[in-house]
Every structure is written in C-alpha cells, then in structure tokens.
Amino acid sequence: MIRVTVTCCLCLLMGMSSILWVETAMAADEPLTLGVFPRRNATVTYKLFKPMAGYLSEQLKREVKLVTAKDFNTFWKGVVDKKYDIVHYNQYHYLKSHKLYGYEVILKNEEFGQDALAGSLVVRKDSGIHSVQDLKGKKIAFGGGPKAMISYIVPMYLLQQAGLNTGDFEVTFAKNPPNAVLSVFYHQIDAAGAGDKVLELPMVSSQINVDEMAHLLTAKPIAHIPWAVKPGLPDSLRDKIQQVLLNLNDSQRGKDILHQAQLTGIHIATDSEYNPHRSIIESVLGESY
C-alpha cells in the first residue's frame, strides 16, 4: 500500500509539473503588442508599420500585433493601461511614461539620414509673415495636440523664446502635423507647428507644392522619436527586440521594411539623450520629468 501511494504521488507530481510547463510555454507564446502613435492618421500608420510587425513576429517566433489609435489621447490611455509591450511614441510620451510608469527607451528613429529632429514654425512664402513677431494676432495650428513634442511643445518654446505669449496669437490644433501644414497651404491657418522635415513627407509633398512653403523658424535638433518597452518585460526579451529592430539596418529586406515605415534607419537610444527635451517641456508646460 505504501509503495502504491508513493508511486501515485510521484505520478501526480509529474503530472502537475507537466501542466505547469505547458502553461508557462503557452504564456511565453502569448502575442506581443506593438503600439505606434498617431503621428499620421491611423490608416496610414497601420500601412507603414504592418511589415515591421510581421518581421518582428517572424524573428521573435511570436505573434506581434500592431495597434494604433485615432488620436493622441486614445493612444496615451493605452500607454497608461500598459497595453503595448513595444511602443513607438513621441518624446513627451516617453518621458512621462518613463517617470510615471517605468517604460524604458531602447531605440530611436533615423529619418532623412538624421537621428535628431527639430520643431519648426511653417508658413506660406506669400503670407507676409517674415518674423516670429509677425505672428502676433495670427492663427497657428499645432499638429497632434498639446502633448505633441515636436509640433506643439517645441514650436511653443520657440515662440516663448521670441517673447510671444499664448495670448499674443490664436491657438488651434490639427489631427496631425501634415494636416496642420496643409491647412496653412490652403490659407485656412496663418502658421503651423510641425517638424522640420514635414514638408519632405510624401503624404505632404504629394498633395501640395511645397516650394510655396517656408520654415519661419526652426529649433535646435534633439534626439529623434523613441521606441520603448513596457516595465516588467524580461531583459532577455527586451534585448532581443532591440537587436531584431537594429538588424533592419543590415539587410536589403530590412531596409525595405524601414523604407515602408518612412525611416532611413533605427539606432540605440539612452534615457540621457532626452534631457534637452525635459528642459523644454518644463519651460513650456511646467512639468518635470
């Protein structure tokens, strides 16, 4: 009887171990979510980054689901709720999520051959606006909303440094930076807050004659848009994700995937590279990250 009982116990333990092993393996195979912020509209964003999500799935041997959102506020809620395992968002989003929720930057964009980006104020060449002071009493559209780093916070910093306060001009917001620039082109708005490369984006240059547009004032370049991972992701998985994305730089297939996402490269990034952004945010918004 004793021998039978011991044997049964061993079988039970082995069975439980097998169940735990299967559950662990299944948990490890759960899909990862890649969240990409609505820098452009959701439909365009999905098209641009779908090949990258597929590549990540293949290389990680684990499904990677691509999601975006209709606007910045909706996307940010996903960050707060930790819905994204891998997240591509603006510098303000990163700094806030790093301080409040523990997100960790791993990479940054390279676009048009540069891994830094500058905020700018864009006008029509025939607008009669030749200096920042000429924007007094004018209407300025900022792309993406009041938390957009390059198209709102930095342009507001430029205006602030030039001595203009919020009450000196009318503020409005476009869904994204390209829409803000298009509004200027069609005489709906006097100026737009956007990135310094916005006029080179295909979705802008294919719709308007960009030769009729000008950058009124451009800020000093700062570290480009980051990629981060949510807290609690295993170090080994974080490092693998970082390496897989870095490898895109080294093959023709990878370069094609980057090109589809309108990137010319992707590079390692560290938190300290975003210290200049912290200073600008504190000056404009009074928030310390």
Image: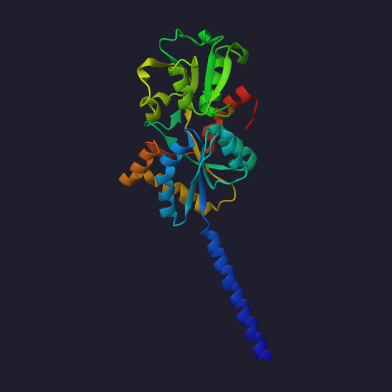
* Percent of width and height locating residue 79: 59, 41
* Percent of width and height locating residue 115: 43, 33
* Percent of width and height locating residue 24: 56, 64
The residue lying at 53 percent from left, 8 percent from top is: 133
Establish if 31 lies above or below 12: above
Closest to the observer: 196 or 177? 177
**Quadrant holding the N terminus:** bottom right
* Percent of width and height locating residue 108: 46, 37
The residue lying at 67 percent from left, 87 percent from top is: 5
The residue lying at 65 percent from left, 89 percent from top is: 4
Figure quadrant of residue 145:
top right
- Residue furthest to the right in view is 2
Asked if residue 222 can be seen in this view, the reply is yes
Closest to the observer: 22 or 288? 22
Figure quadrant of residue 250:
top left
Figure quadrant of residue 265:
top left
